[in-house]
Amino acid sequence: MHNIAILGAGIAGSYLAKRLSEKAGVQVFEKSRGASGRLSTRRGEEFTFDHGAQYFTARAEQFLLFLAPYLKSGLIQGWSPKLITLGNGRSYKRQWFEPHFVAVPGMSAWIKEMAAPLPVHFDCTIHSAERRDAKWFLHDSREQIHGPFEMVLSTAPAAQTAALFPTLAAPLAGVRMQACYAWMLGFEQRTVAWEAAVVQNSPISWLAWNDTKPGRGGPPALVVHSRNDWAQDHLEDPSESVQSELAQALSECAGIDPSQARFSQLHRWRYASTATDLGKPYLLDLASGLAACGDWCLQGRVEGSFLSAYQLAEFLLQGFD
């Protein structure tokens, strides 16, 4: 049986492991304490925040088929918030013209269920990889060695994949990802009627009251997402400076005073969105036993991440027959 290592337990890594485990021995390595990737949910005091991906759409037939049982069970549900556009001191209603979905009771719930039966090494950061006798050996931050593996499949961001596997650096050089700041604010009460807002002409790009999403509830929990280019320009700024600028922007665009929040936490996503993608569904070097996939391959969306992993899995499974 083929022995495969998969780096990352987000949607791409979890789906790859789920599919490939049908015909191969699979081990997943995840640097975080749980499966989710950017479909993350964080709790602070009594507040709950989806501080990564806010929702996703589904257009491709393969993705819709994959989602069907989760929609039937209620783990995935449609989301139709009271949505507006904010900017230049004015607001107006906004319409979504296709279904938007969220996982219940938090975005991470879907990935956690997918990864639950899989052999995942959590809180395990792989910092180097060694090729020896046509096999891969992975070294983690605790100086433990994992292997041997016939193949290593990376679902990490492009820059991290290139750093770990220099032979993949050249084809990954053109991929460009951008950051995002997620500011989580918990309030006593919600003072606005809208539930989500697209923000224009501001350091802020998106606002959502997380407690109004399906299956959430709890006290008002506001997620503030910065613009990607703004976050990239302020990537190494002190957190106090970032919060100060976002606070001013929040007051100006939405009339919300963050000083009234009972809970406040800032999270920096270094690789949040894809500005320039790979232009193909995955990267594969069969001779070296290496492959990489993820949202940075195809358009940078949740669906793009799935389709990237789906197409890589389909190709590999054909060779396992």
Image (cartoon, grey):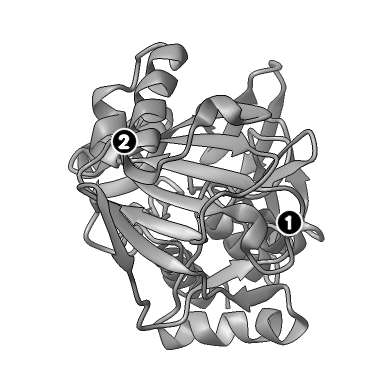
Q: How many numbered discs? A: 2
Query: Of the numbered discs in the image, which one, if any, rests on residue 176?
Result: none
The local crowd at label 2, few if under 14, some if 14 to 19, many if 20 or more residues have their Cα within 10 Å, is: few
- Residue at 73%, 36% (x, y): give it: 33
> Label 1 is placed on what type of residue?
Lys
Residue type (three-letter) at the residue carrying disc 2: Thr
Q: Is residue 180 above or below residue 2?
A: above
Residue at image point 63% right, 62% down: 212
Residue at position x 26%, y 32% in the image: 230
Return the residue at label 1.
112
Seen in the picture, residue 264 relative to 209 is either above or below; the reply is above
Q: Position of residue 268 (x, y in %)?
A: 46, 29
The local secondary structure at tag 2 comes to: helix
Question: In the drawing, does residue 30 fall left or right of residue 292?
Answer: right
Of residue 66 and residue 3, the one placed in the foreground of this image is 66
Q: Position of residue 45 (x, y in %)?
A: 79, 33
Q: Which mark is residue 167?
A: 2
In the picture, residue 203 is in which quadrant? top left
Residue 313 location, x and y as percent? 51, 69
Which element type, helix, strand or loop, lies under badge 1? helix
Q: CA distance from mark 1 to mark 2?
A: 32 Å
Image point (41%, 27%), residue name: 247
Q: Is residue 68 left or right of residue 317?
A: right
- Between disc 1 and disc 2, the foreground one is 1
